[in-house]
């Protein structure tokens, strides 16, 4: 009898994290709810052979997923230092520097992660058709995308495509996404909301501390001040992690509060 993966993805994520934007001692601890939601989504997939993160940036989420699947594939146009580190550390972690529209494979993908990508795709119908081609019935697609109830339409976004070549094309309602996915054999299993304003404030605070710790480590004057910084910050991180997690767990159905909608789709028919 096959057992579901343990709900421990956040701990693996924290252990494997390689992030040049953060100090190793002061990582972003606000993602516990995100990783727990992804872990639940894995558990509705029929198989755990191959997973794919499309547009996954550094590959930080995929590095954790690689512990659950036999093979983990990152499809990302931009080349980043962290990607090579993950490839060297984990034998089942593979990076493809390509747009997904140009990526050709006969391999079927059991779990596809789209973290902050859906809203960037110019031809969303062709994109979803390609997702469907990549999966057999039983495959799962996990979509994290802006919640337009909270964020407003794409033109109000700072990453709107007229201001940035790869910015937001459209920010979709849950119903719009579900209707399109249903046309290609997918059923919406559940939806959640995350990234409330409290998380954003905590993340910005940690980032400010961590970035300075990373930048200033080589400065002689900072060596005198750094123990004081760490003495204050290190005990604070688990407290902030707990507060963010409790806040997001409490409000995970509140679409009026949260910035991101998280949708889990399972392919039911060919």
Image: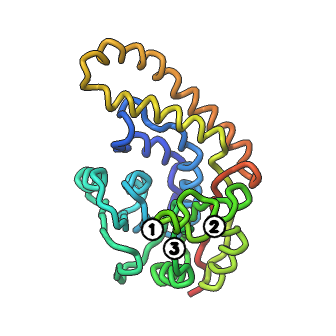
**Circle 2 Cα neighbour tier, 10 Å, few/some/many (<14 / 14–19 / ≥20):** many
The residue drawn where x is 48% and y is 17% is 232
Mark found first going from the N terminus, 3 or 2 = 3
Give the alpha-carbon distance from disc 2 to disc 1, as whole Å: 16 Å
Residue at point 59%, 41% (across, down):
200
**Would residue 1 be visible to someone looking at this image?**
no
The crowding category of the residue bearing disc 3, from other C-alpha atoms within 10 Å (few below 14, some 14 to 19, many at least 20), is some
Percent coordinates x, y for residue 53 in the rendering: 43, 64
- The residue located at (60%, 32%) in the rendering is 242
With 75 as the anchor, is 198 left or right in this view?
right
Residue 96, horizontal then vertical, whole percent: 31, 69
- Give the residue pinned by disc 2: 171
The answer to which image quadrant residue 210 occupies is top left
Real-space CA distance between mark 3 and mark 1, rounded to the nearest whole angstrom: 11 Å
Q: Is residue 168 above or below residue 123?
A: above
The residue indicated by pointer 1 is 165
Query: Horizontal and vertical percent for residue 52?
Result: 42, 67
Residue to which mark 3 is pinned: 121
User: Is residue 189 visible from the viewing direction of this image?
Assistant: yes
Give the vertical position of 242 relative to 176 (above or below). Answer: above
């Amino acid at each position: 009898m096959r057992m579901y993966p343990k709900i421990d993805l956040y701990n693996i994520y924290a252990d494997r994290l390689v992030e040049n934007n953060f100090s190793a001692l002061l990582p972003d601890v606000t993602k516990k709810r995100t990783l727990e939601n992804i872990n639940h989504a894995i558990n509705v997939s029929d198989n755990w052979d191959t997973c794919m993160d499309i547009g996954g940036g550094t590959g930080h989420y995929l590095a954790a997923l690689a512990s659950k699947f036999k093979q983990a594939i990152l499809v990302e146009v931009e080349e980043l230092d962290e990607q090579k580190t993950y490839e060297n550390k984990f034998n089942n972690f593979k990076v493809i520097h390509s747009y997904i529209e140009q990526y050709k494979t006969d391999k079927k993908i059991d779990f596809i992660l789209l973290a902050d990508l859906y809203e960037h795709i110019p031809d969303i119908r062709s994109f979803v058709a390609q997702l469907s081609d990549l999966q057999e019935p039983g495959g799962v697609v996990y979509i994290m995308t802006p919640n337009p109830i909270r964020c407003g339409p794409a033109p109000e976004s700072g990453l709107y495509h007229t201001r940035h070549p790869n910015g937001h094309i459209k920010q979709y309602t849950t119903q719009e996404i579900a209707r399109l996915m249903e046309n290609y054999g997918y059923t919406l299993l559940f939806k959640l909301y995350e990234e409330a304003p409290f998380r954003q404030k905590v993340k910005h605070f940690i980032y400010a501390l961590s970035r300075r710790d990373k930048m200033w480590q080589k400065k002689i004057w900072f060596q005198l001040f750094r123990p004081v910084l760490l003495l204050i910050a290190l005990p604070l991180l688990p407290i902030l992690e707990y507060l963010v997690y409790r806040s997001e767990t409490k409000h995970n159905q509140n679409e009026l509060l949260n910035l991101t909608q998280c949708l889990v789709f399972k392919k039911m028919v060919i």
